[in-house]
Image (cartoon, rainbow, N blue to C red):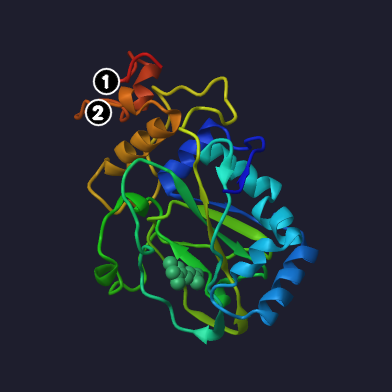
Amino acid sequence: MRTHTCRPTLNDSQVLEFCKQGFLLLEGVVPDEINRRVVSFLDDNPSHEPTEILVEDWFVDNVILNPQAAGAVRSLLSQSFGLPIVMSNHRVECPSPAQGWHRDGNSQHGPALNYLQVFYYPEDCPLDMGPTELLPGSHFLFSLSKQMGHYGAIRGAFRSAAPAGSIFLTVYSIWHRRGAASGHGMRNLLKYNYWRTEPPKRDWVREPDFDIATANYKLEGQTFREQFRDCNDAAEMFFWLLGRSDAFHLEGGQGWPLNRHVGKYLDSPYGVPVGL
Ligand SMILES: O=C(O)CCC(=O)C(=O)O
Ligand SMILES: [Fe+2]
């Protein structure tokens, strides 16, 4: 297996934010010259699975091992992470209708993060070219693709409109769909997975004043589930990434990870996992 080791770029808050949202968008991180070369490669190889691009050194060096993308992957999947083995291209002639909401086949649900689903736009993808829509926090929300495909627009969905060279990392099971495109022309979107090979531990960038007891585990904005479920699930995933699932415990009621602000006036929340 081909693996890669590099320095992590995400800190505690950014890793926690990824647990909450289920995705992270890095705007315009691939140089324009490479983006243009990718588009021309895809015009010559217009299949929906141009896996041959994974043996092009210029592509691997600038996209797969892109310092910002690889640094984020390294933060979430630990060192010696495995490199992609399949390349998909969600290539579509616009205008085109929206896709149905779905999670990709073979999704697992739970706190473990053993691989990442990553997308790369080699060209600008403004709103009229149907950027992928993602439902924040939905990586924990089980539903059958056959059922979620019946939903139309969902309030609170994030539209990943972004400039050429943008890469977004997602939890594999997140709800997503290609947005409706009213613009004209070809739209390419590459998709591939990275893999964990080492057990999780807190080896990303440490923030000296990050406090597990009072960190904000709550997803701001729209939440699609029973109150506080998102908060609890994000905390559980964060603990899994710390390598401390053994210490994770939910007291329920008013206990941790809720009510983080009480420490300002009173004691810290009840039920904070001990020994960390
Ligand atoms: O093209 C997109 O924006 C997403 C496509 C997709 O998720 C899929 O076909 O599985
Ligand atoms: Fe998909």
Q: Is residue 198 above or below residue 185?
A: above
The quadrant where residue 205 appears: top right
Determine which of the numbered discs, if any, sits on residue 250 in the image: 2
Q: Residue at x 31, y 24 (%)?
A: 246
* Residue type at numbered disc 1: Gly
Lateral position of residue 220 relative to residue 87, left or right: left
What residue do we see at 35% from left, 57% from top?
A: 107
The C terminus lies in quadrant: top left
Callout 2: helix, strand or loop? Answer: loop
Q: Is residue 40 above or below residue 227?
A: below
Query: Which residue is at the front of the view, 259 or 25?
Result: 25
Judge whether 48 appears above or below 196 on screen.
Answer: below
Q: Are marks 1 and 2 in contact (CB under 8 Å)?
A: yes
Task: Give the percent coordinates (x, y) of residue 146.
Answer: 26, 71
User: Percent from the top left, x then y, of residue 44?
Assistant: 69, 81
Q: Quadrant of residue 10?
A: top right
**Element class at badge 1:** loop
Decide: few, some or many residues near mark 1? Use Cα within 10 Å; few <14, some 14-19, many ≥20.
some
Q: Position of residue 1 (x, y in %)?
A: 56, 48
Residue 16 located left or right of residue 168: left
User: Is the residue indicated by label 2 positioned so its CB lies within 8 Å of ligand 2?
Assistant: no
Give the amino acid at mark 2: Leu
Q: Earlier in the sequence, mark 1 or mark 2?
A: 2
Residue at which label 1 appears = 271
Task: Specify the label residue 157 is tagged with.
Answer: none
Q: Residue at x 36, y 26 (%)?
A: 260
How dense is the environment of label 2, judged by Cα within 10 Å: few (below 14), some, or many (20 and up)? some
- Give the residue furthest to the front: 1
* Disc 1 to disc 2, C-alpha distance: 7 Å
